């Protein structure tokens, strides 16, 4: 039920069958006010119904979480997440556009209720399985859309796989599924199946040409994989690739081969010309920091910053109109200021520490391993995009992870069992 509801609900929230036909949302002319007003509104009827469905699922999960003799702990990150949520709701008091903030807060409440429901109901590998299922369903629809509209022209050098959503969003969702698949791979007997699926997911992430998502996925994959590698192989793991890369780079330098330019193009996924300005992000950030300086501590209210007037001003200043801040950190600062940002940062940092700690203590803990990998990917990716803080499927899963305690009070890790066994005398 949860998989079907999330797949359908978030399809209408984020996806569109015609995405591959028109990816020009960031190219709207600055003087065209009508599309700007439409962008600021809540969206289509399907989108307005999808968010209540997602929130309703969260309520059901809370009601049907079952009875347990053990009460789950409520760690610091859970309380800080709730305080962050309350601060976000309170931002309507000082919002620059109260009506816009109210609409955004309704959506935020649906996402938070669903995240808390996930936190209370699902354990161990449940969330990883849900992420894989939902993302693969969306991917299947996206591939079908590509084939219908354009024949899936992946052989073109400037092609970016989008499917039914923006390539960057597609990449980060696939990245979350890749981390989940890698966690399930470690506990499955059919490793060939999960290993092949991981390769397919990485291939599609590469086809999106999202450099940040691909790099974040690789780092996160290493963070959850390296601790499982026997110590006798760790030296070869680091020294082997480093030596190979150094040898290749030295050969290209000494021989002055034209292959160097090709290699650079491969590294930057065919988008070398956009690296200097981070695809225009540096200009956007410079302009947005001027707005942030006006309300540094409280922000403009949740969702209250991106008004039609702001779009017009940024369009005139930049020569194009960005769809968002292109940084989850900056977007959060604009929405709820330094105070709200600090609350979310504390909750996230504690959650990262807890998930990483339990991942190292218990090698069989898929839940902690998955969220630790997702957090690492999110921290890296959030510097250049907003997917982890805007209402979307990855945002829901991330919030569920931040609010998680990862352990019940009486849960004993493998490390603790071994220590106990070593302290028990044979007699």
Image (cartoon, rainbow, N blue to C red):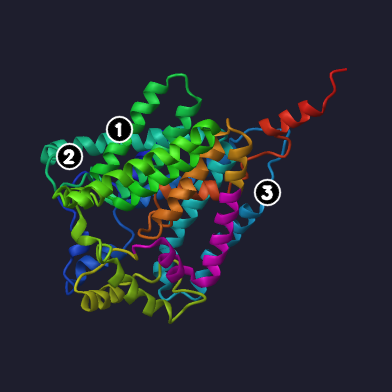
**Residue with the mark numbered 2:** 146
Residue contact at pointers 1 and 3, CB within 8 angstroms: no
Q: Residue furthest front?
A: 254
User: At 67% from the left edge and 30% from the top edge, which residue is drawn?
Assistant: 414
* x and y percentages locating residue 187 in the rendered image: 51, 26
Residue contact at pointers 2 and 1, CB within 8 angstroms: no
Residue 200's label in the rendered image is 1
Q: Dot 1 surroundings within 10 Å: few (below 14), some, or many (20 or more)?
A: some
Q: Earlier in the sequence, mark 2 or mark 1?
A: 2
Q: Dot 2 surroundings within 10 Å: few (below 14), some, or many (20 or more)?
A: many
Image vertical order of residue 151 relative to residue 28, above or below: above
Q: Which residues are magenta?
A: 326-353
Q: Mark 2 or mark 1: which is in front?
A: 1
Q: CA distance from mark 2 to mark 3?
A: 45 Å
Image vertical order of residue 221 relative to residue 1, above or below: below
* x and y percentages locating residue 127 in the rendered image: 49, 36
Q: Is residue 347 magenta?
A: yes
* x and y percentages locating residue 124 in the rendered image: 56, 33
Which image quarter holds the C terminus? top right
**Residue with the mark numbered 3:** 74
Based on the displayed image, in which of its 4 quarters is residue 117 positioned? top right
The answer to whether one can see residue 400 in this image is: yes
Looking at the image, which is closer to me, 213 or 394? 213
* Element assignment for label 3: loop
Report whether 321 appears left or right of 111: left
Q: Dot 3 surroundings within 10 Å: few (below 14), some, or many (20 or more)?
A: some
Q: CA distance from mark 2 to mark 1?
A: 17 Å
Q: Mark 1 or mark 3: which is in front?
A: 1
The overriding secondary structure of the stretch rendered in magenta is helix
* Element assignment for label 2: helix
Q: Is residue 262 magenta?
A: no
């Amino acid at each position: 039920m949860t998989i079907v509801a999330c797949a359908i609900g978030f399809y209408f929230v984020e996806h569109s069958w015609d995405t591959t036909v028109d990816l020009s949302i960031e190219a709207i002319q600055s003087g065209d006010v009508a599309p700007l007003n439409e962008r600021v509104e809540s969206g289509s009827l399907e989108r307005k119904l999808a968010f209540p469905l997602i929130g309703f699922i969260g309520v059901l999960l809370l009601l049907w979480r079952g009875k347990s003799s053990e009460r789950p702990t409520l760690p610091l990150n859970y309380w800080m997440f709730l305080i962050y949520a309350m601060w976000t709701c309170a931002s309507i008091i000082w919002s620059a556009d109260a009506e816009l903030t109210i609409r955004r807060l309704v959506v935020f409440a649906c996402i938070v209720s669903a995240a808390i429901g996930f936190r209370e109901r699902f354990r161990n590998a449940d969330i990883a399985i849900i992420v894989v299922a939902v993302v693969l369903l969306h991917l299947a629809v996206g591939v079908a859309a590509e084939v219908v509209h354009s024949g899936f022209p992946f052989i073109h050098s400037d092609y970016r796989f989008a499917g039914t959503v923006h390539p960057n969003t597609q990449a980060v969702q696939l990245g979350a599924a890749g981390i989940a698949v890698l966690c399930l791979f470690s506990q499955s007997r059919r490793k060939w199946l999960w290993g092949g699926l991981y390769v397919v997911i990485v291939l599609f992430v590469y086809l999106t040409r999202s450099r940040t998502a691909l790099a974040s996925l690789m780092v996160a994959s290493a963070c959850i994989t390296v601790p499982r590698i026997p110590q006798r192989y760790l030296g070869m793991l680091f020294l082997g690739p480093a030596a190979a890369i150094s040898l290749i780079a030295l050969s290209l330098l000494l021989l002055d081969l034209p292959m160097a330019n090709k290699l650079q193009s491969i590294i930057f996924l065919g988008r070398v010309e956009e690296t200097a300005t981070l695809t225009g992000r540096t200009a956007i950030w410079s302009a947005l920091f001027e707005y942030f300086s006006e309300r540094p501590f409280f922000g403009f209210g949740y969702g209250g910053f991106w008004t039609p007037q702001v779009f017009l001003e940024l369009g005139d200043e930049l020569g194009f109109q960005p769809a968002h801040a292109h940084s989850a950190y900056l977007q959060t600062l604009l929405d709820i200021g330094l105070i709200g940002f600090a609350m979310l940062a504390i909750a996230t940092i504690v959650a990262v520490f807890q998930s990483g700690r339990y991942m190292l203590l218990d090698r069989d803990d898929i839940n902690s391993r998955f969220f630790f990998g997702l957090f690492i990917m999110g921290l890296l990716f959030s510097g250049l995009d907003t997917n982890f803080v805007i209402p979307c499927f990855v945002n829901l899963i991330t919030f569920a992870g931040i609010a998680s305690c990862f352990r019940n009070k009486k849960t004993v890790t493998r490390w603790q069992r071994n220590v106990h066994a070593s302290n028990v005398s044979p007699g």
